[in-house]
Image (cartoon, rainbow, N blue to C red):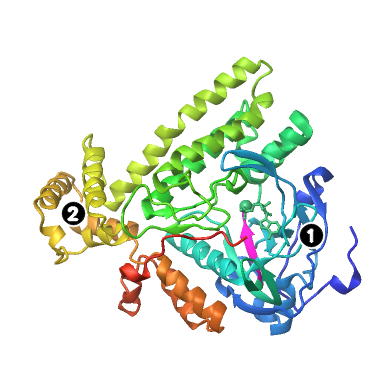
Amino acid sequence: MTLKPDRQYTPANVGWRFDNSYARLPDYFYAQLCPVPVRAPQAVLLNHALAESLGLDLHALSTEEAAALFAGNALPDGAQPIAQAYAGHQFGHFAMLGDGRAILLGEHLTPDGRRVDIQLKGSGQTPFSRRGDGRAALAPMLREYIISEAMHALGIPSTRSLAVVTTGEQVRRETMLPGAVLTRIAASHIRVGTFEYAAGHGGKDAVKILADYTLQRHYPELQASENPYFALLNRVIERQAALVAQWLMTGFIHGVMNTDNTSISGETIDYGPCAFMDAYNPDTVFSSIDQNGRYRYRHQPVMMQWNLARFAETLLPLFDPSQEQAVAMAEESLHAFPRIYQTHWIGGMRKKLGLFTEEEGDSELIAGLLTWMDQHRTDYTNTFRALTEPALPQDAMFRESSFMEWHSRWQQRLARQPQPASESLQLMQANNPVIIPRNHHVEEALTAASEQGDYTVLQRLLAALAQPYEDDPEYFDYRTPPAPSERVYQTFCGT
Ligand code: AMP
Ligand code: MG
């Protein structure tokens, strides 16, 4: 494909190494087009640490060059911009979707041998925009930057955020808002919804092309399996079970777990109305568009299983020539999901409680704590962290008999394992974060940035979130749960 000369761009040595394998797939998988230029781009966030880990040197760019690059006004050498086609089940209903406000610039090869997607989000209309303007407002893009970087620092697989630029243009939502473009880095943007699109558009042949591509890109070790497509399903089930277990263990609620927002690579993707819960309540739902609580905190595992069933359906013709046999295979794998999920969850919860060994009563021990937390609506993050302190906090609830009983059961359990208390403590400190992106702190940072142009609040929050397991007195204020007046009840996806 040829690009207009005014868009080709060869900056100082940033270190781009593009190899655009997705653009070599059959053309029904995407539309080729450039981002729509914006009026007056200004870079407000540049993630130099992430850039470095990708082998990119953003310092090689002038302020203007960086702004033009991450707005899509200029293109990096070797980019081959496309909007990807996909479908998806949104809140249970099937729809044809696609990148309606995003452009994949291409795949960059990192010095350590990874292949990552470089995607601009908010980059203008595409053939998949339907009735949308193709743009994004500043606050939601800053939100994705904050939460995705926090997830990464917590050790949860996630897409990353490389940059946010403001566009100098307004976007119309309920009110007029400043526009922005986010640069997203992902292992890939292949979604369950991409498979649904392939199945619907081109049937078995298209699914096979996409599955072969996915195996090659993400799971090359499975290509030699007896049945690579079935191995692919099982691997994705495994990855997603592990991922959702991590979400629940940190109190994360994705908010829009549609199949188009479920990545085949196992990364958390698409940060819209997502949020971390403060007070423990398994029925927590923040998203303003999730009226029935479909994606509430405790539903996430079962919703992931539902999404994986949609994935499995697309692969059926590749499993076995006999449909009956193919369905039986898929069902067996999908039925294993709860057990696989549970194994990851219990394993992680043991670490949160400092347990190295396994005992039969562990599930009950964990459930005992959660029931007490549920009854008292204790702060999820701070309760687990309190257990890592040498002395329990002064709060009256920790003196209650129901808690004291649980606590002594836990202490006895700890005493039955060979590891010394100091090792347990270390394990707990490494698995119970001190700082999570609490809604009221995120909102405070977004308001200062998007309404006053003050990025110092946001930068400080980012610095704290980059070391979530550190007990740093500098960031003590970020541990505080919201006062009743600060509580955020609803989050919005900002589309
Ligand atoms: P999301 O809820 O962000 O996962 O988006 C769902 C679908 O809507 C995707 O196909 C997006 O590309 C599309 N979309 C969201 N916002 C816009 C917008 N402002 N303009 C065009 N398409 C959009
Ligand atoms: Mg999406």
Q: Nearer the viewer, residue 347 or 281?
A: 281
Image quadrant in which you'd find residue 362:
top left
Ligand 2 near label 2 (Cβ, under 8 Å)? Answer: no
Residue in front for this viewpoint, 492 or 215: 492
Q: Residue 108 vs residue 468: left or right?
A: right
Among the two numbered marks 2 and 1 on one chain, the one whose residue lies closer to the N terminus: 1
Residue 452 vertical placement versus 472 (above, below): below
Q: Taking the image as four quarters, which one is ligand 1 found in? A: bottom right
Amino acid tagged 2: Pro
Indicate the secondary structure of the residue bearing disc 2. loop
Residue at 18% from the left image edge and 45% from the top image edge: 417
> Front-most of 50 and 225?
50
Q: Nearer the viewer, mark 2 or mark 1?
A: 1
Quarter holding the C terminus? bottom right
On the image, the x and y values in percent for residue 108 come to 70, 60
- Judging by the rendered image, the residue that carries numbered circle 2 is 420
Which residue carries the number 1 mark?
Answer: 81
Q: Answer whether residue 181 is magenta in the image.
A: yes
The percent position of residue 398, horizontal first and vertical second, equals 14, 58
